[in-house]
Every structure is written in C-alpha cells, then in structure tokens.
Image (cartoon, grey):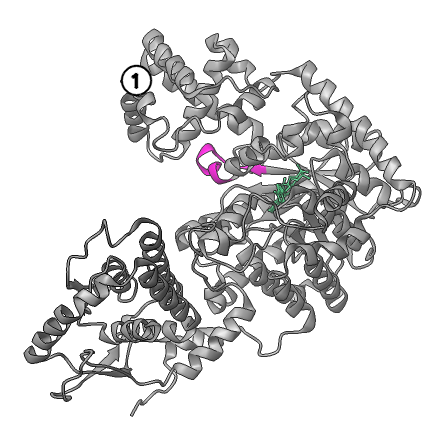
C-alpha cells in the first residue's frame, strides 16, 4: 500500500494557488491565451482619437519629430564618439569596430582572459574565420554606426571591420587596442549610464533637474544568480534610497526623485515555481525597501521584467499595498507593458487594487523591452500563443488604449508615460486634454541617453513634467541593460531608429497607429492578424512537422489544471514487465520501484526479463523484420506521428510518472516529453520525405539501450529512429527507469 498517496513534491502546485481566483486576476491569466485579433479589437475603439484630436496630435508629433531630426543631423556624432576620434584619430569605421569589440569584452569578467581574447582573435587576424559560423562580435555594428554617426550605414561589413582592427594592431600594438577598447567602454557607459555611483549620478543629474526634469534612479543589476548577488543588490538599493532621499529634501513622490528596482535582482529564485520562497524571502526585502522609501517620501517603482513573472509580481504588489505601515502613502509604483495582451486587464486590476487599498499608485506605462526574448521563449516552450503582440502597430494601439484607461482613473493612479516616440507622446498630450491639465495629473518619462532631446521640447515649451530613468553602476553591471538599449536602437521598427533614417518621411513616422492598423485590416480582412513572418509556436517548423506542445508553468490556469491531473495520478501504481508480441507465461519475482525523492512513495513494480524471454524476443524480432521492412515508409511515419500525438495528449499523467520514477523537476519532465514527441515527429518526417524501400534497405532487429537521465526522450528517440528506418526494435530501459520505458512502449503499441 502506498503510505503517502500524495507525494510531497506535488504540494508545490497548491502553493500560492487560490482555487477560485478573483475575477480580475482570472481575466489577466486568461488574456495570455487570447488570439491577437480578439485581444486587439476592443482596444481600437479606446485608442481611436475623437474627431479633431487625431489631427492635433499628428501636427504636434510632426513638429516635434522634425525638430528632433534637424537637431540630430546638425549634432551628428556629437559627444559620444568625439573623445575616441580626437584621442586616437580614428575614423568612424574604426570607432565602430572598437565599440563592437568593447561590447564583446564586457562579457568577459577578468582582465587576463580579455587580453587573451584580443591576442587570439585580433593579433592573429582570425576574424574572418569566424564570420558566418559563430555569432560575430560585429553583430551590432549597424547599431553602433547609428549611435556614433547618427546615420544608418550598411557599409560595415565583417571583413572590412576585421581588417580595420588588424591594421590598428599593426600600427599601435595591443596596448593601443586595449586603451581604445577601454575608452569605448567608458563611452558606452557615458551614453547609457548616469553615473558609476549614486553620488555621481545625483551630481550629474543637477543640470537637467535645473531645466525641470525629474529623475528615477536604477541601480544596474538584475537576474541575481546567488543569494550573495541578491544581497549586494539589496544593499546597493538601500544605500541609493538613503542618498536619493537626502537629495530629495522632502520634495515628495511627484516633484522629487525616486528609485526603480528590479525584483529579479533581489532574489535568485524569483520565479512562479518558487512562489512560497518568493513570498517568504523576497517579499520582506521589498517591504523593507518600500518602508525606507516612505521614510524619505520618494517614489519606489517596481520595474516590469519577463512576462512569466507578471503574475508573481502582482502577488507581491497586492501584499505590499495592504502593508499597514505603508497605509495612505502614494509612493508605490508599478510598471505595465503595453506589448502584452494582458495589459488592459493588468490596469483594471491595478486600479481596483489602488481603490481597495487606499493608495494612489504610480503606474508607468511602457511598451516593453523584452519583445525578442518573449517571442523566442514562447517558441522554445511550445506555448499556445505569444504573450505579446507580434506587430509593432498593435503595441502602439494597446499603449494608447491603456493610456486612456489610466487617465480615466485619476484618483486611483498617477500615470507615468514612458516613451521615446513623438507620436505616442503627442497623442497622450492631446488625449489628456491640455486645457484641463494640472500638476499631478500625469508625467512623461524617458531613458537617460535616449530621450532628452525629445523631452527638451516638452518640459519647457509644453510645460509637462518628464522624469529621466537613470541607470547607475559600473561597466561590469551594464551588459544586460545595454543589450536592451541596443535592441531598441537597432530595431528597424523602433522610433529612435527610424527618426535617424532620412529616407523615412515624417508623415509615415508619425502616422496614427489606429489608422495604420485599420489600413492593414482593410487589406487583410481582419484587424489584429498576427505578423505573417512570425508563425505561432506550434507552426514553427512550417509544413515539415508540428512543434511539440509545452505547458506554461507560469500560468496559474495551466498550473491549476496540471495540479488537478497530478493529484489524480499521484497514487497510481505503475507496472513494467517484458513486453513481447507473443507473451510467455509470467514468471519470476517483481520488485518495487521507489520515488528517489521520497522513498515512502512506491511508484510501481517491475519484473525483469528472463534469459528465455530475451531469446524469445530476439527470435520474434527476426520473424517480424521482413514485414516491417516492407511496410511503406509513409505508413511507418503515420504510426510514429500517432504515437507522438498520444504522448502529447497524455502529458500531465506522464509528468507524474517522470517526476516520481526519475526524480525529474516538472520543467525537466515537460522538456522530456516534448523531446520524445519531437523525435517521433522528426523521424516520421524524414521517413516520409527521404526514405524509399527501393533505395533504403532496413538492417534488421536493433537493440536500443537507454540511460536513466532521459528515460523517455532518449529511449523514444533511438527506438523511433530504428522504427522509421524499417527495423524492429529490442528496447532495454535503464534499470532505474523501467516504468517510464514500459509506458513509452505501451504508447507505441497503442499507435499501432
Ligand atoms: P517605439 O519605437 O514606438 O516602440 C518600440 C517598442 O514597440 C518595442 O520596444 C516593443 O515594445 C514594441 N514592438 C516592436 N516591435 C514589435 C512587434 N513586432 N510587435 C509588437 N510590439 C513590438 N521596459 C520594460 O519592459 N520594463 C520596464 O520596467 C521599463 N522601464 C522603462 C522606463 C522608462 C522611463 C522608459 C523610457 C522605458 C522603459 N522600458 C521598460 C523600456 C521600454 O519598454 C522601451 O523603451 C519602449 O518599449 C520603447 O517604446 P517607445 O514608445 O519609446 O518606442
């Protein structure tokens, strides 16, 4: 008898999961799976400007964009590259090459290895050999060209940049390169970072503060990997709050400076799977930081990170809002990302939370900085859809619709519109009804080194406040932030990129996104169709084969469903014994199979094969071989595909078995089932397209022996390859994981 019908490892699914989520939260969770057209269509009406306002916004956007473009071309390479050029008399080509190298070197933590890279790769002129094979250090050449010269030039080829670097070495030797690279690194820092320390940053901010800008400081650092890292970041935040608080001199959360924090910096396990640890260990840190910020009355803002952390961050926010010691304080801030299909529902929740808890929350609306990785993650994880929109114009529409929602709840939220896009800025300015503006209604925000020229036209001339997001830290902590800025500057959809490209007319640049989407809809028949070049995760491999389906372990809905299936199968007793086409009478002892993580959990029983059974199996395989070899490859393929579908449909139950018998984590177990499904489909596709019984002769029975660490994936992979090629299989599982293997064989039999 199983002494513990529900293995303790299954408890994590009940962890932090209310059985019936409140309706506002349920809508957020569900919206992640809404197809794009349904997600977008209600937003079009909310984003559409009333009569007259569209023209007004466009005119203002046009004016701002024109001035911005004129300024950019006049100032050209101002500032950033000048030092490099003056000190080393380098052409922009050489500057670009050094910037690329500097960026690559930022990834290397110690000086010795940096020198080795320079020696190895440059001194011996090996750049060319890398081109086209591994990701080159020159991938961001176009972006650096844009930043340094203000022009988008396509002439930076890999070979010309590598020649430049080799020539530089020849002229000045490695010391020159090292100095040049050091300089390039400092300039990158200068472009995107306000100061290496909070004291420096506060001092550097004074000039623009005097012009009316406000600041929110961000201590660079995110994605802590160890508790030590997390502790370092927490101390940096605490020190920063003291410094900012003193500098603020009680100007308050609206007029004074604030701080932005990343929760991933404060705990190495900031993920949905660790809900209770996050609540027990990260939350108290967040609370302490908020109390400290309250002491000085400076705003404390929680940055938005990856989409799979959104719901967890909402749990933390909700708890923080009901913290008695923070009652009545209006300095709690939260970021929402308009590129997420969930955005409008997150705003509904935040507005409701503000009303329930009696805070006026500061809500920063951004479009979102992780677009590329959200798309890639959803594909990798085989999710049903993307959490984000796939077309830029949809994000713009969502931004405006969500802006209206925020402006409509002035007593509950203080909207902070963070954008570098002249049209978005102008649309918000007109949407907020300039005739009724009063201080405290809303503010704009921009990033240090990216938005100042734009907002110099807003803070003074239009008398609207703008807060600069000011990263603080050393070169070593810059990389993750820098990559996001490079992506934003380098993307051909992004406003900061397009404003620098004189071939794009201002009219196109400042087109109202509602009009853009309506134009697309007129051509395509429906508004909100996904980007044609971004297939849904399931269709990633086109007509060749379906991508295996995953499970979103960050979605409370799928966790709830999975938790249910797991508890149903938790007490299931599995059984394995030799599986022969013609079974011999059962013989011999059975042994129990224990859960390696919890020995009280008896997963099932196994009976090992006898020598006679092995011999019988070999004889049966030989007898069956001619018939299987003569089966048309397309028929073999169809059977493998059927097996893949059965595995996929039975995933929740299989996860229970994989975690119990093999000690897999849930994420690993999902990957395991998916890999098995992929193998089956992959070999089926090969058999279908490449094999013919006339040209490919089967070899005869195959012995497949699999390891315990991938008891389903590698087991199925070997077996599927041999079967696809027309060979019968004698499969021997790892002795630690016979139950999983037996289930895999049952599935193959069921498939035919
Ligand atoms: P635009 O050029 O108009 O928009 C670019 C954006 O459109 C991209 O960033 C992306 O979000 C979206 N986009 C691009 N291509 C597509 C596509 N094919 N389909 C759908 N959408 C697409 N970001 C965060 O994620 N979390 C934060 O906490 C955060 N804090 C910020 C704070 C401030 C003060 C500022 C200014 C920005 C912050 N950002 C944050 C970064 C922000 O998300 C980007 O700067 C912003 O998305 C750029 O938008 P834009 O309106 O300036 O430019």
The response on whether ligand 1 sits within 8 Å of label 1 is no
The residue located at (52%, 69%) in the rendering is 558
**Residue 640 is a magenta residue:** no
Q: Give x and y (percent) for residue 745.
A: 27, 73
Which stretch is magenta?
471-480
Task: Tell me the residue at 48%/28% (across/down).
Answer: 140
Quadrant of residue 319 in the image? Answer: bottom right
Instruction: Name the quadrant containing residue 450.
Output: top right
Provide residue 674's location: percent of width, then percent of height. 38, 61
Q: Name the residue under label 1.
A: 125
Front-most of 502 and 450? 502
Position of residue 454 in the picture relative to residue 232 (left or right): right
Give the x, y percent position of residue 724: 27, 59
Nearer to the camera, 198 or 625: 625
**168 vs 444: above or below:** above
User: Which residue does the image show at 13% across and 88% down from the upper left?
Assistant: 589
Q: Ligand 1 appears in which quadrant?
A: top right
How many numbered marks have been drawn onto this rendered protein structure? 1
Q: Which residue lies furthest to the front in this view?
A: 694
Secondary structure of the residue carrying numbered label 1: loop
Q: Is residue 637 above or below residue 564?
A: above
**Viewport quadrant of the N terminus:** bottom left
Q: Is residue 325 above or below residue 517?
A: below
Crowdedness near tag 1: few (<14), some (14–19) or many (≥20) residues, C-alpha within 10 Å: some
Give the quadrant of residue 629.
bottom left
Quarter of the figure with the C terminus: bottom left
The residue sitting at 42% across, 51% down in the picture is 544
């Amino acid at each position: 008898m199983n002494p513990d019908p529900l293995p303790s490892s299954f408890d994590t699914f009940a962890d932090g999961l209310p059985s019936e989520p409140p309706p506002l939260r349920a809508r957020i969770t569900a919206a992640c799976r809404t197809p794009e057209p349904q997600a977008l269509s209600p937003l079009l009406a909310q984003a559409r400007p009333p009569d007259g306002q569209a023209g007004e916004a466009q005119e203002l956007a046009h004016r701002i964009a024109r001035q911005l473009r004129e300024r950019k071309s006049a100032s050209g390479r101002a500032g950033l590259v000048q030092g490099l050029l003056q000190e080393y008399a380098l052409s922009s080509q050489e500057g670009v090459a050094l910037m690329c190298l500097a960026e690559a070197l930022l990834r290397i933590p110690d000086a010795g290895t940096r020198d080795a890279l320079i020696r190895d790769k440059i001194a011996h002129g090996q750049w060319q050999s890398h081109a086209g094979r591994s990701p080159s250090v020159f991938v961001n050449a176009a972006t650096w060209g844009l930043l340094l010269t203000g022009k988008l030039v396509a002439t930076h080829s890999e070979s010309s940049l590598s020649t430049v670097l080799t020539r530089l070495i020849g002229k000045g030797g490695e010391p020159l390169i090292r100095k040049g690279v050091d300089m390039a690194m400092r300039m990158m820092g200068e472009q995107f970072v306000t100061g290496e320390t909070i004291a420096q940053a506060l001092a550097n901010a004074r000039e623009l503060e005097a012009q009316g800008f406000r600041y929110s400081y961000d201590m660079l650092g995110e994605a802590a990997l160890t508790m030590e890292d997390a502790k370092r970041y927490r101390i940096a935040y605490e020190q920063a709050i003291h410094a900012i608080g003193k500098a603020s001199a009680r100007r308050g959360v609206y007029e004074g400076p604030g701080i932005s924090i990343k929760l991933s910096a404060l705990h190495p396990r900031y993920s949905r799977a660790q809900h209770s640890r996050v609540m027990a260990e990260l939350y108290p840190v967040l609370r302490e930081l908020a109390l400290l910020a309250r002491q000085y009355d400076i705003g404390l803002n929680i940055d938005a990170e990856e989409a799979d952390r959104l719901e967890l961050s909402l749990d933390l926010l909700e708890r923080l809002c009901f913290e008695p010691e923070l009652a009545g304080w209006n300095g709690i801030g939260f970021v929402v990302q308009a590129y997420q299909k969930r955005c409008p529902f997150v705003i509904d929740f935040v507005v409701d939370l503000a009303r329930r808890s009696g805070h006026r929350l500061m809500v920063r609306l951004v479009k979102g900085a992780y677009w590329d990785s959200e798309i890639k993650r959803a594909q990798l994880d085989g999710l049903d859809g993307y959490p984000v929109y796939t077309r830029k114009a949809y994000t713009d529409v969502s931004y405006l619709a969500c802006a209206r929602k925020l402006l409509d709840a002035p007593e509950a939220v203080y909207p902070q519109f963070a954008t570098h896009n002249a049209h978005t800025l102008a649309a918000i300015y007109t949407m907020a009804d300039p005739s009724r503006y009063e201080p405290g209604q809303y503010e704009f925000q921009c990033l240090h080194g990216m938005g100042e020229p734009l907002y110099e036209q807003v803070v003074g001339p239009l008398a609207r406040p703008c807060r600069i997001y000011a990263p603080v830290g050393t070169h070593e902590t810059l990389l993750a932030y820098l990559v996001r800025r490079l992506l934003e500057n380098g993307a051909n959809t992004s406003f900061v990129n397009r404003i620098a490209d004189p071939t794009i007319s201002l009219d196109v640049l400042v087109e109202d996104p509602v009009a853009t989407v309506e134009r697309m809809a007129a051509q395509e028949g429906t508004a909100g169709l996904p980007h044609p070049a971004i297939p849904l995760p399931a269709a990633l491999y086109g007509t060749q084969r379906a991508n295996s389906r995953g499970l979103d372990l960050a979605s409370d809905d799928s966790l709830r469903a999975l938790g249910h299936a797991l508890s149903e199968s938790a007490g299931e007793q599995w059984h394995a014994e030799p599986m022969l086409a013609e079974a011999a009478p059962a013989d011999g002892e059975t042994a129990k199979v224990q859960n390696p993580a919890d020995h009280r959990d008896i997963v099932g029983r196994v009976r090992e094969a006898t020598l006679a059974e092995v011999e019988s199996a070999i004889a049966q395989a030989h007898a069956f071989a001619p018939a299987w070899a003569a089966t048309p490859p397309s028929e073999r393929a169809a059977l493998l595909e059927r097996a893949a579908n059965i595995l996929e449909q039975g995933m929740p139950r299989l996860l229970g078995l994989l975690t119990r018998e093999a000690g897999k984590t849930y994420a690993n177990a999902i990957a395991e089932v998916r890999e098995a499904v992929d193998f089956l489909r992959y070999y089926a596709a090969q058999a279908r397209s490449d094999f013919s019984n006339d040209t490919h002769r089967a070899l005869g029975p195959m012995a497949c022996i699999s390891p315990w660490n991938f008891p389903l994936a590698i087991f199925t992979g070997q077996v599927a390859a041999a079967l696809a090629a027309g060979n019968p299989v004698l499969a021997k599982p790892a002795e630690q994981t016979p139950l999983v293997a037996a289930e895999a064989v049952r599935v193959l039999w069921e498939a035919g």
